Image: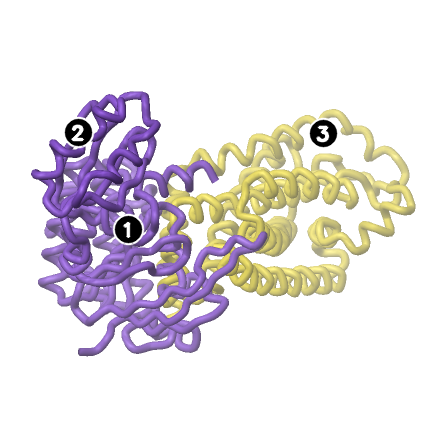
Chain colours: A yellow, B purple
Amino acid sequence: MTVAVRQTLALTKRQLLALWRQPWFVAITLVQPIIWLLLFGALFKHVVDLPGFHGGSYLEFLTPGIVVMSALFSAGWHGMGLINAMERGILDRFIVSPVARGSVIAAGLVQSIVVIVIQSLVIIGLAFAAGARFSAASVLLQIGLAALLGGAVTALSDGLALVTRQEETLIGAVQFVVLPATFLSSGMMAAALLPGWIQDVARFNPVNWAVTASRAAGDDWTLVATRAGFLTALLVACAAIATRAFRVYQRAV
Amino acid sequence: MHSAIEAVGLVKTYPKDVRALTGVSFAVAEGSIFGLLGPNGAGKSTTVKILTTLTAADDGTALVAGLDVLRQPQAVRRSIGVVGQKVGVDPEATGRENLALQGDLYVMPRRDIRARADELLRRFGLDDVADRLVRTYSGGMQRKLDVAAGLMHRPRVLFLDEPTTGLDPEARAEMWAQIEQLAAEEGVTVLLTTHYLDEADRLAARLAIVDRGSVVVEGTPDELKSELRGDALVVELDGRLDGAVAALAQVPGVNETSLDGRVLRARADEGARAVPLVLAALDQAGVPVVSATVARPSLDDVYLRHAGRTFGAADREEVAA
C-alpha cells in the first residue's frame, strides 16, 4: 500500500466516521429534494400529456432531475466542512503533516459521494413507493451520474472554501448556482418544451448532461457514454483546481 | 552545537500591506526549549507558520532540523510536530482516533501507533477519556490531546504556539510541568511562543522578544533580566498625574521613568532606599499615591526597555488596531 493511499484512507475514515455519528446531516439535506419530488410530482402530474413528453409518468421523468438537484445541494455545501476544519485548526494540522493536498481533497470527495449515493437511493426509493418504475440500468445510471456531477461540485465547493475562507460566500454561491443550474436543464421539463435559449444553455450545462444521460438508459448508450465522459473529465479538472486552491489558502494564512 | 532551528531575516507581508514580519532572525540549539515572547500581533505566529511550512516567507531563509523549509518542505514536515494556536484536534472523533489519524498521516507502523497512542494518553492523563468524543473534553484536556497529537510521530522539533492561552491557572501549571518533562524525556527541541512573561521565564532556556515584526532582544531569561541594573519601581497614582514624571526626575538614583495610564514606572539603583524619596517627591508635587511597590527586574521590564512600551500597553494597542 503506497503512502498516499494509506494517508487518503485515514482521512476518508475520519470523514465517514463523522458522518456515521451524525446521520441527521444526511436527513436534513434530503428534506428539500423530497418536498420537491412530491410537490412537483403532484403539481405537474399532467404535464406529460403535452406534446414533447413521450408519455409515461411525470414522476418517472422528474426523479432523475431531483436526484441530480439533491446531489448538487449536498455537494455545494461540502466546503462548509472544510471551513469548519480551518476554523478549528484541523486543516492546518493536515497541511503541516506530510500528507499530499490531493489526499485531503480526495477524502472529501469519497465522503461526499457516499452521501450522494445514500440520498439518491432514498429519493429513488420514495419515487418507487409513489408508483414510479425504473430499470436497474436506469437506477445505476442515475446514481452514478449524480455521483460524478456531485463529485465535481464537491471539489469546486472545497476549492471555493479554500480561496474565500468564509461561509457567507459559499452559501451565496450555492444559492446562486444550484437552482438556476437545475432549471436551465431538462431536469423538470422535457427538452423540446424548453425555450430556445434555455435549450442552448442546457447543451453546455453539466446538470443537463447528467439528467439526459440518466434518462437515456437502454435507448441511447452513445449519449450515456459521452456525457459520462464529460462529467468524469469535469470531476478530474475540478479536483485539480481544488488541490491548487491550497496554494491560495497557504498564501493567505 | 547544532542548531535545530535557524531563521535568518524572515520577512512576511500580507495583502493590504500588513507587515507581519520585518526581518526575524534567531537560532535554537538542539534539545533546548526556546521561547518567542511578544504581545498579540507581534509576529510570533507568523514566524511559526513559516517555520512549519504552513506559509512561505517573502524573504529570508529558515532551516528546521537542518532542512530548508522552502526547498525541502516534505522532509521538514516529517521532522516536526506542530501544536497550533487553535486546538487542531477533531471534536467529532475520540481522543484515541485523533492520535491514530496522526500516526497514519505520518505513516507510522500500525503496532507502533497503538503503543505510542497508549503511552501518550497515559502520560497526559487522558487514558480514562481516550474513547470519548473530544467535544466532551474540557479545554485543558483538548489542549493536552493536541500536544499529544503533535508528539505522536516522535518529531525532532516541536512547535508550541501559545499552548496555554485560554487555560485556567491550574491547567496552565500542569501544562508547564508536562512540557518540561517531555522536553527532557524525549530530547525534543521545543519552540514555544507565548505572550505570558511568566511562561517564558519558567520554560525557556533562551528566548527572543518579538515586537512589531522583528526580534528586539535575545538571550537567557537571566541574562536579559541582569541587563537591567536596579529594581523596578511601580507607583500607582490616584487621578492627578501632572508633574509626576518631573517629580521623579529630581530623585537621585531613579531613572527610566515612564507613565502608563495611572501607573508610574521607574528603575531604581536601590529600590528600598528610593521609595521614601520618591513618595516625598510626589507628595511635594501634589500627586496623590495609591500604592508603591519595588520588585526585582522581570521580563516585563526587559520588554519595556527594548520595545519602549509595557507588555499590557502593546496588547491593548493591538486590540485597538
- Mark 2 or 3, closer to the camera: 2
Report the chain holding disc 2: B
Dot 2 falls on a residue whose secondary structure is helix
Name which residue lies at 43% across and 77% down.
B71
The residue that mark 2 highlights is B279
Q: Residue B26's x, y, as percent? A: 30, 67
Evaluate whether label 2 is on the same chain as label 3.
Answer: no
- Distance from disc 2 to disc 3, alpha carbons, whole Å, reads 86 Å
Q: Amino acid at mark 2?
A: Leu
Name which residue lies at 37% across and 71% down.
B8
The answer to whether residue B233 is above or below residue A220 is above
Report the chain holding disc 3: A
The answer to whether residue A126 is above or below residue A2 is above
Q: Nearer the viewer, residue B267 or A3?
A: B267
- Distance from disc 1 to disc 3, alpha carbons, whole Å, reads 74 Å
The residue that mark 1 highlights is B305
- Mark 1 or 2, closer to the camera: 2
- Distance from disc 1 to disc 2, alpha carbons, whole Å, reads 23 Å
- Mark 1 or 3, closer to the camera: 1
The quarter of the picture where residue B81 lies is bottom left
Dot 1 falls on a residue whose secondary structure is helix
Q: Nearer the viewer, residue B146 or B262?
A: B262
Evaluate whether label 1 is on the same chain as label 2.
Answer: yes
Q: Residues within 10 Å of mark 1 (few under 14, many from 20)?
A: some
Q: Residues within 10 Å of mark 2 (few under 14, many from 20)?
A: many
Report the chain holding disc 1: B
The residue that mark 3 highlights is A40
Name which residue lies at 47% across and 70% down.
B59
Marks 1 and 2 in Cβ contact (< 8 Å) = no
Q: Amino acid at mark 1?
A: Arg
